[in-house]
Image (spheres, rainbow, N blue to C red):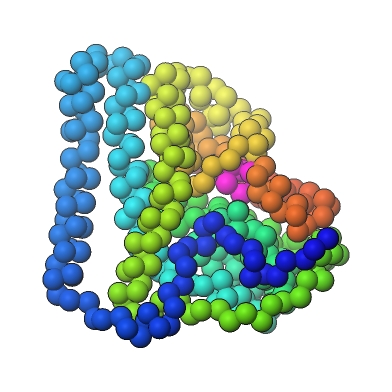
């Protein structure tokens, strides 16, 4: 089998390409007029965002002439209102997070984690996963880079669990749509699963179950371009992140909103409460099993979560469903199979799945 150097692997969600140093040196300072334009754009964004609900109601009931209280009207209003709402929130959040992410290149992340005590490394890795723009499709190059940097297996897996699941975009969207309590619960439990899951796998000493070609591959001494340094470069990085990330995920978000609209308009509250409510003890494992074969990013799941909770589904069950879709999706497992042997894959799925089950049952019991 031909071994490829790390430099040949490319990620789809690792953010825009770093800006060469020669461009940094020639970057001119930001003008006052540019700041004024930026503030005006933010003000316009806020005005449009505030007008979304009355516009959705006008289109649904006045322009389309749908009857208030009907299933179709409820679904249409939900779709018309939530589609621009979620996409606008996503755009502004990705822009801000893109600026933050300009401080965290893959090389810098590896440098931060390398050489730390494993228990400290699990905690750092979980929090770095929140702050870095990597998804499950980035698993192979990131895993190889971390292994070559000498980062322990458990710490590496803490990062790979946290990065897609405790997505900073999802946390802000949850805050905007469902309140800070739900956002805080999601972030706290996701971090706990990443920390504990990575720590448990690290204690099992399963390094021998990494594919041989990964441990034998030679590191390539390629120079890594430094990330953007000036404010102008970081703003450009944020705009590139919007173009890159929103351009990739908007279809999934619209699909998620369509599913959420159908649930909101047509699924009876009593039906969902009976199969995903607190009283159904089997609802949490069923939700996890249903979520694993599915694939969606965190942002695309938010409208579905909003609709499920609004129809009476228990919070713990819905969180378990969302986490299983994001952290244990079948496509991610297939990707990880390229670098991990079957036994380590099974352990990874088992440990993370058990953590998700605990979260589901815990919050169904206390909320």
Question: Percent x, y for residue 221?
Answer: 66, 81
The prevailing secondary structure element of the residues shown in magenta is helix
Please state if 147 lies on the left or on the right of 136 as rendered. Answer: right
Q: Is residue 346 left or right of residue 138?
A: right
Where 32 sits versus 93, above or below? below
Residue 266, how many percent across, how many down? Answer: 42, 18
Instruction: Note whether residue 189 is visible.
Output: no
Whether the magenta-drawn stretch holds residue 324 is answered as yes
Q: Quadrant of residue 293?
A: top right
Horizontal side, residue 73 vs residue 348: left or right: left
Residue 73 in the image, given as x and y percentages of width and height? 30, 19
Residue at image location 21% in from the left, 26% down from the top: 59
* Residue 245 visible in this rendered orientation of the protein: yes
User: Residue 108 falls in which quadrant of the image?
Assistant: bottom right
Looking at the picture, how far across and down is residue 174, in whole percent?
A: 41, 47
**How many numbered markers are drawn?**
0
- On screen, 29 above or below 241? below
- Closer-to-camera residue (123/29): 29
Q: Up-down: is 45 above or below 225?
A: above
Question: For the point 29% across and 27% down, which residue is it?
Answer: 77
Residue at (69, 51) in percent of width and height: 335
Check the picture and name the quadrant holding the N terminus: bottom right
- Residue at the farthest bottom position: 25
Q: Which of these two is toward me, 361 or 138?
A: 138
Does 121 appear in magenta? no
Residue range highlighted in magenta: 323-329
């Amino acid at each position: 089998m031909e071994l490829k150097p790390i430099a040949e692997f490319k990620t789809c969600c690792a953010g825009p390409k770093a800006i060469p140093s020669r461009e940094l040196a020639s970057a001119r300072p930001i003008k006052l007029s540019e700041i004024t334009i930026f503030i005006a754009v933010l003000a316009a964004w806020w005005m449009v965002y505030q007008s979304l609900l009355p516009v959705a109601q006008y289109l649904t009931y006045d322009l389309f002439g749908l009857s208030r209280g009907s299933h179709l009207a409820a679904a249409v209003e939900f779709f018309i209102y939530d589609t621009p709402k979620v996409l606008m929130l996503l755009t502004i959040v990705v822009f801000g997070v893109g600026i933050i992410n300009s401080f965290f290149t893959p090389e810098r992340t590896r440098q931060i984690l390398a050489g730390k005590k494993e228990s400290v490394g699990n905690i750092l890795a979980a929090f770095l996963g929140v702050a870095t723009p990597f998804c499950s499709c980035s698993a192979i190059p990131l895993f190889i880079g971390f292994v070559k940097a000498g980062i322990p297996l458990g710490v590496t897996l803490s990062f790979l669990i946290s990065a897609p699941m405790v997505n900073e975009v999802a946390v802000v969207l949850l805050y905007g749509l469902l309140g800070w309590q739900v956002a805080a619960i999601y972030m706290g439990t996701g971090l706990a699963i990443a920390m504990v899951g990575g720590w448990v796998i690290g204690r099992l000493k399963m390094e021998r179950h990494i594919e041989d070609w990964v441990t034998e591959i030679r590191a390539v001494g390629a120079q890594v371009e430094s990330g953007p340094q000036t404010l102008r470069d970081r703003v450009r990085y944020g705009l590139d992140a919007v173009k890159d990330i929103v351009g990739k995920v908007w279809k999934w978000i619209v699909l998620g909103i369509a599913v959420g609209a159908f649930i909101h308009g047509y699924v009876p509250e009593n039906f969902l409460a009976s199969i995903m409510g607190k009283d159904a003890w089997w609802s949490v494992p069923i939700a996890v099993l249903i979520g694993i074969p599915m694939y969606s990013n965190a942002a695309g799941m938010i409208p579905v979560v909003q609709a499920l909770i609004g129809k009476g589904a228990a919070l713990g069950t819905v969180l378990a469903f969302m986490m299983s879709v994001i952290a244990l999706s079948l496509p991610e497992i297939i990707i990880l199979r390229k670098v991990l042997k079957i036994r380590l894959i099974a352990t990874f799925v088992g440990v993370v799945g058990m953590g998700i089950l605990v979260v589901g049952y815990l919050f169904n019991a206390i909320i």
